[in-house]
Structure formats: structure tokens, C-alpha cells
Amino acid sequence: MHDANQADAEELLRKREIDLAITDLEGRPPMSIQSCVLVSLRLVLVVPKRAALRSLKEAFRNGRPLERLISLPAGEVLTKHFHAGLKKLGLIWTPAIEVSSIDLIDIYASLGFGVGLSVAVPGRKLQRGLHHVSLPAFPRLTIAGLWMGELSELAANFLADVKKIASRLNR
């Protein structure tokens, strides 16, 4: 198993170092790579109840953010989607804290370090003391399976299982 973004996953597929990638999509894969969208997730802000934010608009005063932003690194698709959405609104919100996983965003927000950028995962319980502020006008985070050629039986079975799980999230 490799932890790889779309570009790295595509390269690993071309080199035949992997059979199947499950990754977030930044753009359309090349024609030589087959794909199937598994799930599309809404961007959200993870807000500590003490912050009392109910909308993105409330997070800014005079075009400046009122809270520190906790997010994944700038190169991650989720972060790029968020900043693209902010740019359309004429806003800038530079992260104060960068973390390596979405799970850490909830933890840091619950400890009061700021407002986190995350995705709404259906059925996932939010930690006590936190709430989501939905960002419906922002691009969604799309997770897809990528492969080249015919999948091995093992990879095909794995993809089928992932599709079943994803279909429950898409409801």
C-alpha cells in the first residue's frame, strides 16, 4: 500500500507498481487510466461550540478571518478546493496550523486551537463540543478508484467491496 495523491498514484499505475489506487481527484485522469467515482464529500468547517460560527460569512469581519484555520497542507486537494472557493468570494484564510490527517483536525478544533477544514462524512459522529458549518458553494472532495487495463481478481474484489462501502456513504 502507498499513500499517494492522484499524480503519484497515476505514475505508480503507469510503472505497474500498483494495480489499483483509491485517491482524491484533483482533475480528470488521463484516457489511459480507468476510473470510477466512489464518493463525493461536502467541505465543512469544524467549529468549536465556543466559537458560535453558523456560516462562513460569520468567520470574517472586514474581509479578515476571526479564527485561526486548521487544515491539511496546501498541496492537498481538500485544501486547494477550499482556497479556490474562498478566492471566488474574494477571501483569504491562511492556515495557522497544518496537520497531517483529517482526524487531527477534529482533535485540534476540540482543544480550541481554531476552526478546522474538513469534509462531512455521512454517519461519522462529530466529537462532543464541535459542530459543522457547511460550505455548499465550494467544490466537493471526490474520492475515486484508478487502474490501468484489466484488474486482477483480487483487485477487482477489493474495488467491489470499496464500492459497496462507498454506496452506503452516498445515501
Image (cartoon, rainbow, N blue to C red):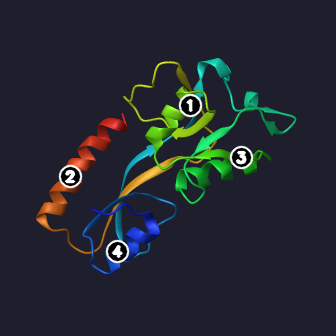
Other residues around mark 2 within 10 Å, as few (<14) / some (14–19) / many (≥20): few
Q: Is residue 17 above or below residue 4?
A: below
Amino acid found under the numbered disc labelled 1: Ala
Amino acid found under the numbered disc labelled 2: Ala
Q: Residue 4 appears in which quarter of the rendering?
A: bottom left
Return the disc, 3 or 1, that comes first in the chain's sequence: 3
Return the disc, 2 or 4, that comes first in the chain's sequence: 4
> What x and y, as percent, mark residue 110?
53, 26
Residue matched to label 1: 109
Return the disc, 4 or 3, that comes first in the chain's sequence: 4
Q: Residue 116 appears in which quarter of the rendering?
A: top right
Is label 3 in contact with label 2 (beta carbons under 8 Å)?
A: no
- Residue at image location 54% in from the left, 34% down from the top: 108
Q: CA distance from mark 1 to mark 2?
A: 35 Å
Q: On residue 12, which mark appears?
A: 4
Going by the picture, which residue comes out furthest to the bottom?
A: 15
- Asked which secondary structure carries label 1, the reply is helix
- Residue at image location 73% in from the left, 45% down from the top: 93
Residue matched to label 3: 86
Residue matched to label 2: 160
Return the disc, 1 or 4, that comes first in the chain's sequence: 4
- Residue at image location 46% in from the left, 51% down from the top: 142
> What x and y, as percent, mark residue 27?
51, 64
Q: CA distance from mark 3 to mark 1?
A: 20 Å
Instruction: Give the tally of numbered discs.
Output: 4
Is label 3 in contact with label 1 (beta carbons under 8 Å)?
A: no
